[in-house]
Amino acid sequence: MTDFLRQLDCLHLKFVIVLSVCCHFDLSFSSLTLSKILAEKLSTLFIQHHNDTVTEQSYYRTGGDVKVITREEIEKRHYTDVTEAIKRIPGVTFQNPGYRGGEYGYVAYNNGVLINGDSRVIILVDGRRVDNAASQRISGSSRRGTKSTGVNLDQVTNMENIEKIEVIKGPGASAYGPDATGGVINIITRKGGYSTVGTIDLASGSWNKHNYSFSYSGSLDHDNSLHYFVSMNRTMSGDTEFKDGQTGDVIRLPGSRYREDGANIRIDKDFDKKHSLRLWYNHKSGRDGYPVATPSAKYWNERDWYRILFEIVVGRYDSNHKLTEKGQWWTDQRQPGYHNVYLTRYMYDISNDFNNNDWDLVYTFNKDKGMESFVRAYYQNHIYRGRAAFQFSKFGGGGGNGAGVGYDEYNNTFPTGTTYEQMYAWMKEHLAPFPGGDKKAMDEWVAKTGGVSPVTDWHREENNGIELQYAKSLGKHDVIADFNYDKAKNYTWRNRRAGDYSVTHLSRDTITGYVQDKIHVSDKWDVTPALRYSHYSSFENTNSSDTQQGKGKTSALTYALNTQYMFDDTMSMYFGWTRIFRPLREGDYSTANGEYPNMLEDEEGHVMTIGLQKLLGNKTSIGVNYNWTDMTNAVATLPIWSTRLNDFAATAVNAREKKTAFNITLDHQFNPHVTLSASYDHMYDKWSAKDGMRIDPNWGYVSADDINVQINRLRPANHYALNLSYENRKLYTGLLANWYTGNNTSAFTSRQFLLLDWNINYQVAKDFNVYMVVSNLTNQSYETTYNARNGIGSAAMPGRSFVIGAKYTF
């Protein structure tokens, strides 16, 4: 078998290109009649020239720009999570706070993946959506939330269990939902092979980071019809470090430690060529820290600590240290270094426990030209336990309920003011100690104020459903019909030390029906029309005080039209047009205020994508993609005139949103050993009020409170990427450069960031590899997101780190 694969590598490149193009367009011979081994080997070469590859989900694609992370690439580059794997793909950007754990992956503002600048991205595992329609993660609120489905990519599965990752930019896979405006990320799991194979992968590196993984796969029956794949992993790290963008100091991020465990099982039974049964189980659990934001090095000292905390817990004062204003929650602009107070949580061992269990059972009862007819049953149960009880002062107060609680005590003690020394002594006696100072003082403070945090928040997201798909090839028509019923629930329990106790239960049902016809007009032209019906039940909430009880029921019929045309063996073009429908989420209602209360409508609009792919000789390919989104009913918070208030007021309304995205990629093979991939991306959004709304004439994105309308400030305007790799027999090494320019300095610490990641893999023996991965090679300071309250640089990303490991195959 090994010799056969080596021979494939020596095939003339033009044969590979022609054969792969035929596979992609389902020409006279079916793409999936190729042997699986051949398709697997061709995929690595094909991705460099046509941005596509053959997988179990290929028949869903109806056009668009498709990138695939193959198993071979995962092995060579030793990605530790899905985020790391897909960050190199043109048009894909991440907005996260520089840590994992706590509310990361649970609260929408902490977890954003964008494709072509749009956070309406659908996450799939083996073609099944893994979001929860009742989840609070879908949108914290329209005022400060996102439109993301809220799935944390790095909690879906572990890398040992992944065969491929497909990234479909734009509406090229409309089968997955009417809200896939930005695109789709499809994680395809591994199936056991015919021979027994086991792997052990051990790695260690910076910040006491350790990764352990094990996999074992093969076939049980004498006829090789029963396949299994089992994997387990553990990843852990101590507190990370980052480089502060304002001072250049490298400092530790307290509370950013984490430990996560995973286990996956996939069992496949092939009854014959058309009938099979697949059972997949995914478990992931762990306990992660909860830092919320990186500290500001400029104000990370004891005096500034007490200044900030005093202004929150007590208030502001004049030159004689007499109170002039009662304490409240400010912002970084009014209170420099404000977000440092979040590190109080670190002293109380604030953390988040999670336990995820996912089941997926699929019976395939027919296969026709690679298209599967199947029935699927699935169940997801995700539990989060938050530890969030802490205290700023002896008067109580933690989180948003601690503002001004010490005002009366200080005012009674120093009614006419005092000296700075006396005020400072009062601060040290009554307020929480500096988290970066004396550990004994911190331990004593925690003991006096209730000890380390117990479980204060409990969330359970549960959804289950059934899916039926029937696919049939009728001459030039490849028809797929699909029905899905999903029942989602979200349970929330809170019990704070202050006595704020509440229990809520939110549920929502979803029914969808979908039909697609891929029409092979000719050997060079495919046209794919599609229709989808979606019905969403109302939000049923057990909290009787919730004003949104019974709201949200809606239905929609959406359409899509995609086409691809191959001019010759070297050039193809695609075009897609899709009607977008995103139903209102429970969080959208929470900001309905001002002049237009409770009048929000579902988000609607259209998205168009067009692209060209061209081979320039045998060693170079180029791809160009343009994406245009026109949302006529996007939900946003804008300053609208209120006759009731006789002033402009921040109001949740349906506004107009126009979004454009452009990217170009160039792939070149210098010689059999050196390859280069380069890309450029540009994204831009424009928001405006609809007819009949009077918007504040002085309004600008700079002062906007809505994360959606601020998006141009919250991401770099331009993204350049360069991926250079060298491979020669036993050695593989790659350098990835990401250059972000056009950053808005009101949101980022620099106008541009240049990041370098490097990895090397060497095969010591046939079954033994050693490797090293270095992230942020030059130790740059950078951020990928911004929060107006916390200020610039409050989401600094990790500094330089390395991991050294070894993998043994047996």
Image (cartoon, rainbow, N blue to C red):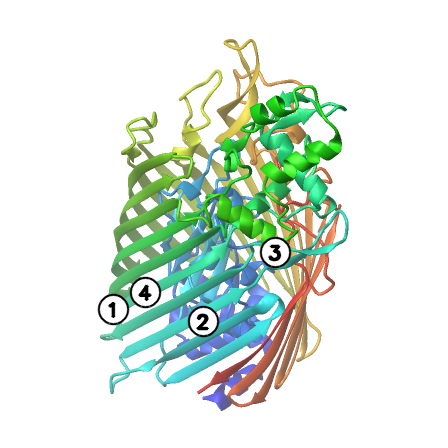
Q: Quadrant of the N terminus?
A: bottom left
Nearest to N terminus: mark 2 or mark 4: 2
Q: Residues within 10 Å of mark 1 (few under 14, many from 20)?
A: some
Label 3: which secondary element: loop
Circle 3: residue type: Pro
Q: Residues within 10 Å of mark 3 (few under 14, many from 20)?
A: many
Q: Residue at x 66, y 22 (%)?
A: 323
Q: Is residue 168 visible?
A: yes
> Where residue 90 is drawn, which disc sits there?
3
The residue closer to the viewer here, 798 or 391, is 391
Circle 2: residue type: Glu
| Mark-to-mark CA distance, 2 and 4 | 14 Å
Circle 4: residue type: Tyr
* Tag 1 residue: 277
Nearest to N terminus: mark 1 or mark 3: 3
| Mark-to-mark CA distance, 1 and 4 | 14 Å
* Tag 2 residue: 160
Of labels 1 and 4, the one closer to you: 4
Q: Quadrant of the C terminus?
A: bottom left
Label 1: which secondary element: strand
Q: Are marks 2 and 4 in contact (CB under 8 Å)?
A: no
* Tag 4 residue: 281
The residue closer to the viewer here, 265 or 328, is 328
Of labels 4 and 3, the one closer to you: 4
Circle 1: residue type: Leu
Whole-percent x, y for residue 395 in the image: 52, 33
Label 4: which secondary element: strand
Q: Residues within 10 Å of mark 4 (few under 14, many from 20)?
A: some
